[in-house]
Image (tube, rainbow, N blue to C red):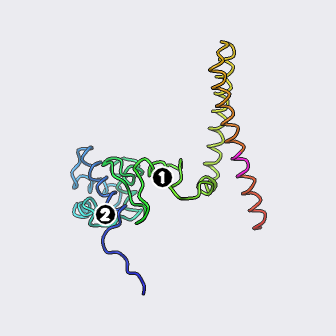
Amino acid sequence: MAKTRERTPAAVSRVFGRQVKEARRRLGLKQVELAKRLEELGVDMHQVTIARVESGERRVSVDDALAIAAALGVNPLYLFSGDFTNEPVHVTPTLEITPSQMRFWFGGNRPLPRTDERTFFELIPDEELIARQRRGLEHLKESVFHFVRAAGAKDQVEMRYALSLIGKELERQHEGLELEERRARKENEDA
């Protein structure tokens, strides 16, 4: 027997609606003012629809979510994460995460619980990979500078700390290189 689609809004849409309401309240906007901002952005969403989104009566499409975030002038991440209302988010019926977990997941900083970390960090756009490598090199340069300064002051505690930072960054860089090598081998095998 086929499952029928749930008629009530999904948990994420309900959290999103409460987040929109709280963000709008913090900005001192009325629903009609948000509707006007959306209209100025070329999105036809009436005050009644906004009320239904905020109350959790209406599911939110990705298009609507991004438009509302743009109209409010906030990062969409915060509207999905539960941060303004400090509530957990049910990503799926069996996976509930905290606002900070949602933020870190959406920000590309940490995978969801019970998911493959390697896949999460491996499947990223090339531009992001390059940015991460640049940040890593900058971090390594700062750590070496910190070590040299500590060595000049003969501060062994700070020298050990700087060396630990250097070691961690070198390990991270090594893991990144291994991931890239695996990706290149897989691409060659698939070709």
In the image, farthest residue toward the top: 153
User: Seen in the image, is 175 located left or right of residue 19?
Assistant: right
Where is residue 109 drawn, in percent x and y? 53, 47
Q: Quadrant of the N terminus?
A: bottom left
Residue identifier under label 1: 106
Give the residues drawn in magenta, as a range: 175-179
Q: Point out which mark residue 44 bears.
A: 2
Q: Point out which mark residue 141 bears.
A: none
> Which of the two marks, 2 or 1, is nearer to us in this view?
1
Type of amino acid at the residue the image marks with label 2: Asp
Contact flag, marks 2 and 1 (Cβ < 8 Å): no
Where is residue 46 drawn, in percent x and y? 25, 62
Front in this rendered view, residue 184 or 29: 184
In the image, farthest residue toward the bottom: 1
Q: Quadrant of the C terminus?
A: bottom right
Question: What's the magenta bit mostly, secondary-structure-wise?
Answer: helix
Marks 2 and 1, how far apart in space?
A: 27 Å
At x 26%, y 55%, the residue is 36
Where is residue 74 drawn, in percent x and y? 37, 47
